[in-house]
Amino acid sequence: MRIRINRVHYPVVVLGYGRRAGLWVQGCGIGCAGCVSRDTWAADPATEVEVAAVADWLAGLPDDVDGVTISGGEPFDQPAALLALLGALHAWRATRDRPIDLLAYSGRSMAALRARFGEQLARLDAVIPGPFVAAEAPGNKWRGSANQELIPLTPLGHERYDAEVDRPAGQTRMQLGSDGDRIYHIGVPAPGDLAALEAAMARRGLGYAEASWRSK
Ligand code: SF4
């Protein structure tokens, strides 16, 4: 089974509990106004990889992984591939000594997810559903807008996320990553964060050649 992947990163510390593996899928048909991940919208077949390749990457991670966050892009736009990925994640985490939770974002409502994607939900510990709504930004911790809930689904999900459901976002909302060719932001910026970062860079003589969140 193949899945479109935009990027992977470890460790991610701003999208869920603890130190996490981040998987960003490629392709989103929802198109929220104000989305800062426009580079993930196109369902580009050139980004397809085998789910087994993702599993191989996970197998090489250190022992301190606390969880996996699946974001994008819209993970549920590839339902069969997502199901295969979640199967691989379950097999992988069974080989680890620490508890590892699986958290996914979606631009769909919880009702829509429950109606169409029960099999995928059954393999997740928590989900953050709902589109980004710029008029309701910022959201609570790990979320872009106030309409987006954090919904624990399993005992591990409740253990790790019940206390976070209504917690406001703190100061640490973003981190930076790089794959050698590009720098990418990880996390959920509050309104003004990216402009403030760009202004701070400009004061030091730095600038972006391209910025995907400003794409047409
Ligand atoms: S915020 Fe998420 S669901 Fe909305 S357009 Fe961006 S990637 Fe898609």
Image: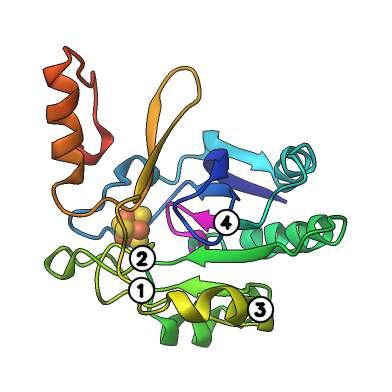
Q: What amino acid is labelled 3 in the image?
A: Glu
First along the sequence among labels 1 and 3: 3
Give the residue pinned by disc 2: 141
The mark nearer the N terminus, 2 or 1, is 2
Q: Which of marks 1 and 3 is in front?
A: 1
Q: Is mark 2 on a helix, strand or loop?
A: loop
**Ligand 1 image position (quadrant):** bottom left
Q: Which residue is drawn at 56% across and 48% down?
A: 23
Name the spot of residue 16 as percent of width and height, x first.
50, 60
Q: Badge 1: how crowded within 10 Å, few (<14), some, or many (20+)?
A: few
- Image height of 183 relative to 42, above or below: above
Residue type at mark 1 is: Arg
Foreground pick, 135 / 64: 64
| Whole-number angstrom distance, CA of label 4 to CA of label 2 | 13 Å
State which region is magenta.
Answer: 69-76
- Quadrant location of the C terminus in the rendered image: top left
How many residues crowd around disc 4 within 10 Å: few (fewer than 14), some, or many (20 or more)?
Answer: some
Q: Position of residue 33 (x, y in %)?
A: 18, 58
Q: In this view, does 121 lie to the left or right of 72?
A: right
Residue under pointer 1: 167
Q: Residue 139 in the image: state x and y as whole percent.
A: 26, 68
Q: Which is more foreground, mark 2 or mark 3?
A: 2
- SS assignment at label 1: loop
- Whether tag 3 and tag 4 are in contact, CB under 8 A, the answer is no
Residue under label 3: 119
Q: Say above or below: 146 vs 23.
A: below
C-beta proximity under 8 Å, tags 2 and 1: yes
